[in-house]
Amino acid sequence: MNAFEMVMSESGEKITVALMTAEEFKEQAENYLYGRELVKGLKSIRYCKAEIYKDVVLGIMRVPRKKQEGNNPWYSFGFYLNDSRLIVIDDEKNRMKETLYKVRDRIQNLLSSDHFLLTLLDELTAEDALYLQHLESSMGEMEEHILSGEQETFDQTFAVNHKKLSEFHFYYEQILTIGESMQAWEEQRTSGVSWQRFTARAGRLHDYVTFLREYSLQIRELYQSQQDAAQTRVVNILTIVTTLFLPLTLLTGWYGMNFAVMPELHAKYAYPTFIVVVLVIIIVEIYFFRKNKLL
């Protein structure tokens, strides 16, 4: 277990911030009020949630990774909060240890234990706006490629971006709910910690992701319309070619019957005349198609 203490600026009381693995917390769960309830939640973390009790907050977090690490696009941890202690439960101790010490260095005047938790959640979302802007730029490039006809990698890029946006949309909905729940905790204690600011920020990120998801769907519709237009052009060309050769097919079929009573077969200029007729038909058809903007 890694732990350190911080002194609250107003009261001078100490709070303890500890980092444990799930196994370490399970062994000590009997020592903490509602500790067994948190152990159950740690077994399979599939969403973000904060359960508010009279003197304790139990939480689990499932945070989408901004960079792919292995096969898991999420990292998860839990937390146990009361008036004098914050315990972060995570098996990836090296990553969370660095984050906790970074949060400790950011806080100049600690107001309460939930002030540390608020700053921790702020730190976890600190670069989210920049990351979402990066995704928006990537989608803008996709749109430009579609309009310029470069569509070879669209399906793969779209699938990756849309999946990531769905993950963040799901995540922000849940931390928005956590922020609202912690506002109630804040009101009970009047500690001076502003969870309303965190909730507003989570709401803005949620709105931004919602906009990007709609933008992503618009890009997919643009791609589909480009595909449909290309298919329509191919069908039009095939239709025109078929139409061009239809009267020629009629003529060749007609004169291919070789009836003895057909006087043109024995005429001196029958073959050149046939060629001229064919060329005239083709020229007239091409003129017709161009005039009607079909070619």
Image (spheres, rainbow, N blue to C red):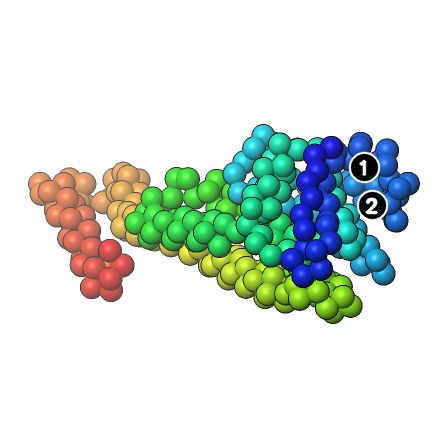
Q: Earlier in the sequence, mark 2 or mark 1?
A: 1
Q: At which x and y percent is residue 294?
A: 27, 59
Q: Residue at x 39, y 39 (%)?
A: 152
Give the position of the C terminus as an image quadrant: bottom left
Q: At which x and y percent is residue 176?
A: 65, 61
Q: Residue at x 81, y 37 (%)?
A: 25
Q: Nearer the viewer, mark 2 or mark 1?
A: 1
Q: Does residue 197 lie above or below 8 as drawn?
A: below
State yes or no: discs 2 and 1 in contact (Cβ < 8 Å). yes
Between 137 and 216, the residue placed more toward the observer is: 137
Query: Left or right: where does residue 62 sit relative to residue 287?
Result: right
Asked whether residue 242 is in view, the answer is no
For the view shown, which residue lies furthest in the right direction?
A: 30
Query: Left or right: where does residue 158 sit relative to residue 259?
Result: right
Give the position of the N terminus as an image quadrant: top right
Question: Which residue, given by chain and number where applicable, does mark 1 sit on?
Answer: 25
Question: Which residue, given by chain and number where applicable, does mark 2 sit on?
Answer: 38
Q: Does residue 40 lie above or below 109 as drawn?
A: above
Q: At which x and y percent is residue 178?
A: 70, 58
Name the quadrant containing residue 18: top right
Between 119 and 155, the residue placed more toward the observer is: 119
Q: Does residue 40 lie above or below 294 as drawn?
A: above
Under circle 1, the secondary element is helix
Residues packed near mark 2 inside 10 Å, few (<14), some (14 to 19) or many (20 plus)? many
The residues tagged by marks 2 and 1 sit, at their Cα atoms, a distance apart of: 9 Å
Name the amino acid type tagged 1. Phe
